[in-house]
Amino acid sequence: MTFTITWYGHAVLAIETGGFHVLVDPYLIGNPAAAITPDKVAADFILVTHGHGDHVGDTVEIAKRTGATVICNAEISKWMAAKGLKTHAQHIGGGYHHPFGYLKLTLALHGSMLPDGSNGGNPVGLLLTTLDGQKIYMAGDTGLFGDMHLIGEEGIDLAVLPIGDNYTMGPADALRAVKMLQPAHVIPMHYSTFDVIRQDAAAWACQVEQETSAKVHLLKPGESLTLSPIPGMREFAEKQPDRF
């Protein structure tokens, strides 16, 4: 079984794993980098990292069209449920075995007010372990923090990190994050959507590959990366449910 992740610009990610479509932070309308429209994107589950409009995005419209379950923190879950959506609330440090894999919410250093001014709770990152035992860390909007060392101890196959600066980590801190996480693969995101977060991603990728063992994948909006699991990893994961 393979894992495919598609970047639709800004922080929008679409994951196909175990026969499920998992959409992350679907900010499409108003996103100048968006490579798909809300009426076209597939979703069985929608993961929302925090309450800002460029991450909540079109969650409500997509979830109503597809029937997707929205997974997020408890405060955003309550806000989404009031709009008639199916939700599953989690919080930082908590994990749950969803049909598509084991999802744990991690720390993220950022804000989270919802578009209408409601309390959006704490922002989060996402640590997903697929049914085959692949580990994908999607940092969300965050600054650098020391506990990335601990996340790295999980053995990260893919890290998706913001590099835009101003609102999140910039290139220098994102490089430090890669050194702490030690992932096999990296995808940069949350950059160059607007002038204030414009970055030279190619230069950053060269520096990362010179200073770490990670392989950087510079996806254009709409492009995908497919990773295959290590043989035997699914059986290993099933024998260690507490770890995975």
Image (spheres, grey):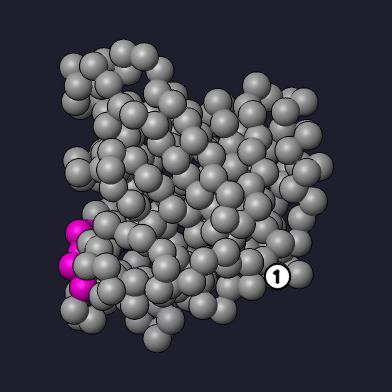
Percent position of residue 147, x then y: 47, 37
Say what amino acid the circle numbered 1 marks.
Answer: Phe
In the displayed structure image, the side of residue 202 where residue 121 appears, left or right: left
- Give above or below for 83 relative to 142: below
Q: Residue at x 57, y 64 (%)?
A: 35
Q: Would you say residue 235 is visible in this rendering?
A: yes
The magenta segment: 85-89
Give the residue at mark 1. 194
Mark 1 crowdedness (10 Å alpha carbons): few <14, some 14-19, many ≥20? some
Residue 127, image quadrant: top left
Please state, as top left, top right, bottom left or bottom right, where the N terminus lies in the image: top left
Q: Residue at x 28, y 43 (%)?
A: 19
| In the image, residue 59 lies in the stretch drawn in magenta | no
- Give above or below for 153 relative to 225: above
- Disc 1, SS: loop
Q: Residue at x 23, y 81 (%)?
A: 83
Residue 145, image quadrant: top right
How many numbered marks does the figure carry?
A: 1
Give the dominant element type of the magenta stretch: helix, strand or loop. strand
Q: Would you say residue 92 is visible in this rendering?
A: no
Percent position of residue 162, x then y: 60, 51
- Give above or below for 118 relative to 57: below
Looking at the image, the residue that sits furthest to the front is 40
